[in-house]
Each structure stands twice: as C-alpha cells, then as structure tokens.
Image: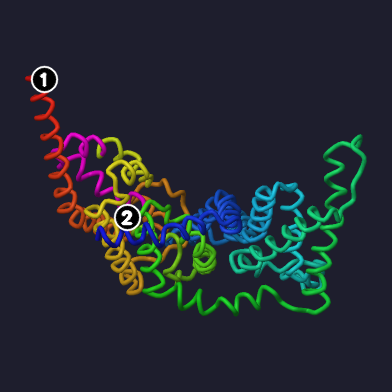
Amino acid sequence: MKKFLSWIEAKLMPPMVKLSQNRYLVSIRDGIIATMPLVMLGSFFVLFAQFPIPAYQKLVAPYVATIMLPYRITVGLMAVYAAFGIGYQLAKRYKLDALSSGLISMGAFLMTTTPVLANDATDAKTSLGMVLPMSYLGGAGMFTAIIVAIIAVEIIRFCSTHNIEIKLPDSVPASVSRSFAAIVPSAMVIILVWVVCGVLKFNVNEALMQLFKPIVDVGMNSYFGLVIPPLLITVLWATGIHGDSIIGNLVRPFWLILWQQNADAVAAGHAAQNIATEGFYTFVWIGGSGGTLALCVIAMFFAKSAYLKEIGKLSVVPGIFNINEPIIFGAPVVLNPLLAIPFIVGPFITSTLTYFAMSMDLVNKTSMLAPFTVPFPIMGYMITQADVRAILLMLINFAIYLAIYYPFVMMYDKQLLAKENEEAHHEADTVTA
C-alpha cells in the first residue's frame, strides 16, 4: 500500500493537481455550486407536495400546482442560473467584466430554446402568446449551459484581447463604459447562437442529450458508474489531492440530470427511478469522504495514544456535520498506508450495499437535495421522501465503517503510543542526566 501511494504521489498527483486547477473545471464547479441554495430550497417543495401520507396527499391535491411553483422556478430553471454562474466565474478568472459576461452567457443559453405559440390548457381559444418551453431549462440543459457559457466568455475574451469593442472616453462612468464595451461581443455571441439554433434549426440541447445519453443512463446509472467515483475520490484524497474537486466536478452535471428526473417523477406522483444522483453518496460519505465519522468515534473512545484520542475529540463534531478535513489532515489519513486502506475500501463496500438496496427497492431512491452539513441519518430520511428504511441503511453503513476502521485505527494507535512512550522515556532520561 505504501508503494502504491508513493507511485500515485509521484506519477498521478502532478497531472491531477493541474486538472483540479483547470479554469474551466473550477468555473463549472463554482457556477453550479452557486445555484445550489435555490435548487435545494426548491426541492423541498416536492416533499411538501408529495409527502408520503395518503391523507395528507388527498388534503393538498387541489393545491399541488401552487405548492410546486417554487420548484418549477428554481429546479426547473437550474441550467439558466448555471449558465450565468459559469460565465460569471470564468470571466472573473480572465479578469473580464464578470456581470456582463454572465448575462451574455445566460442570454445565449436561453436562445438555444426556441419559443413556441401556446394556448391556455384550460381554454383552447385563449392564446398565451409566445412561451419558452422548460424542457431544457433545468437539469436536461446543463450540458448546453456549460458549453454555451464557455464559448460566450471565450468570444468576449477574444474581443477584449484584440480590442474589438466600443471604447468610450475616460470621462464616461465606468458602468456605462462597460455596457458599451459588451455590445460587440454580445452581438457576436447572440448572432452565432441565432444562426446555429434559429437559422439552421439545430437543436443543441437534444443533440447533446443524445450524445451523453449512454453515459448518463448506462455509464453513470449503473453499479460501476456508482462505485468508481468514490474509489477515485478516496485514492486521490489519500495522496493529499481533494478528490471531490476533480472527480465530483466531472460527474456532477450527470448526477444533477438524473436527480431532476427523479424529482420530476416524484412531483408527478410517481416513484424515483435513478440511483445515480449525488444524494446516493449521502449513504456512502458518512462523516465526509471515506466515511471518516467512524474513524473519529474510534479514535475518541478507543485510542490509547494521547495524540489520536485528542484528534478524535477535535474532529468528531465537524465529522457529524460531514466536515472531515480535520481528521484527514490531522490523523492524518493523507499518505498514511494504515488508515488509507479502510478509507478506500469502506466506501467501496457501502456504495455496493447502497446500490443493491436501492436497485431492489429496499430503500427509496433520492429525489431531494439537502445541504451537505445535515447530519446522518437525518439527511438520508429527508432526501428519500421520508423513507424510514433510509435511516436503517445509514446505520448499517456506519456499523460497517466502524468494523472496517477499527483494526487499522488500533494498529496505528499502537504505533503512536509506542512513539509517545519512547519520547517520554527519552525526556525522562534527559532530565535525570
């Protein structure tokens, strides 16, 4: 294990660190994360509309459309907000006007959806005028939002670099100057999207969904698609690389698409069907990446070395809220062959168990999002439409982590205790001398 970690540190770590700092990946991450407060809030309205108690559902049935309005405007427009956020973040990294870049990106993304003439569903004779279909404005349009935002900002950057913009005298207020400077790149971006989507009638959203469909439906939503990400994340963490910032950024758009399909199904009164959502890992990351809450508990209650016991005490409270940097870098887990083994193996076992539990409908699949700091097993109960069985599954997974971590923590504790005793004897001999 030590040789394996050394090989990863020497060969894999440099390109992974470089990848984690890639401007596009970082901008996509920050842009999508910026939408999470709205998306999380909106997802709770699915629970309000479809709480799994027949009497309650019957009571609110006449008001479901009204209750679901916040969901439609938050989750249903998730890709719109992401397009703005990604454009904004990427422009900041290029030191461009972030606000106008975000707005241009969002406008360009909206142009990929063609407005249609619609009638009122309750009165066929009443025209609603031109409306924008929402099919690709949520999770299904996430790939388009990412690509369009990046292209838009690159065009803006090209114009700025080559001075292809309207420049006003220095006496003009900066806000006005920036607005005029954005006119030429805005025109280039909008005309490009108009030609592709309006003139050529090319459906970018549908093309990208068809392109990624095998990855989304088969690659991600399968057993291997679910166990490989935590395996890669923990291996990278064990070498000191923030695994989720690399692997999570790559797969999060896929998770969001599958999650929104689940949320839409539940909102319509059906059962969620997709397993591969980010909520799945709520059952795997108990205490954070690697399931380290068990490590904190064992260290606090069973360690005999002063150092490990103290680290356990300091890390257990953050661990309850799924913040595990204190234990990962404090124990440490990083570049520690003894603790790296359960850190990598544990999530593989719990993700396998969770996958089969959900695929066999022993536990509801996740259809809500919640802040990552919600403690277990409350979070599992929340995101599975108040499924009590989710609590049991999380407790089982936690017990598995305790069993896997215990022998390795005890071996590591023995090493630390021996070192502490040796240092104590050395200090005693020094004082005596």
Is 61 or 427 nearer to us in this picture? 427
**Tag 2: residue type?**
Gly
Task: Indicate left or right for 105 with 249 as reference.
Answer: right
Q: Are marks 1 and 2 in contact (CB under 8 Å)?
A: no
- Residue identifier under label 2: 290
The answer to whether residue 42 is seen in the rendering is no
Say above or below: 203 vs 294: below
Say above or below: 342 vs 409: below
Pick the quarter of the image with the C terminus. Answer: top left
Residue 189 has which mark? none
**Residue at 21 percent of width and 39 percent of height:** 308
Task: Indicate left or right for 198 with 105 as reference.
Answer: right
**3D distance between C-alphas at marks 1 and 2:** 43 Å
Task: Indicate left or right for 378 with 277 as reference.
Answer: left
Residue 291 lies within the magenta run:
yes
Residue 238 lies within the magenta run:
no
**Tag 1: residue type?**
Val
**Residue at 34 percent of width and 72 percent of height:** 361
For discs 1 and 2, the disc positioned in front in the rendered view? 1
Q: Position of residue 424 (x, y in %)?
A: 12, 29
Q: Position of residue 307 (x, y in %)?
A: 21, 36
Mark 1 vs 2, N-terminal side:
2
Assign a secondary structure to mark 2. Answer: loop
**Residue at 83 percent of width and 63 percent of height:** 188
Place residue 157 in its image quadrant: bottom right
Task: Indicate left or right for 165 with 263 as reference.
Answer: right
**Label 2 crowding class (10 Å Cα cut-off): few <14, some 14-19, many 20+?**
many
Residue 431 has which mark? 1
Residue sitting at the far front: 433
Task: Write down the region rendered in magenta.
Answer: 286-311
Assign a secondary structure to mark 1. Answer: helix
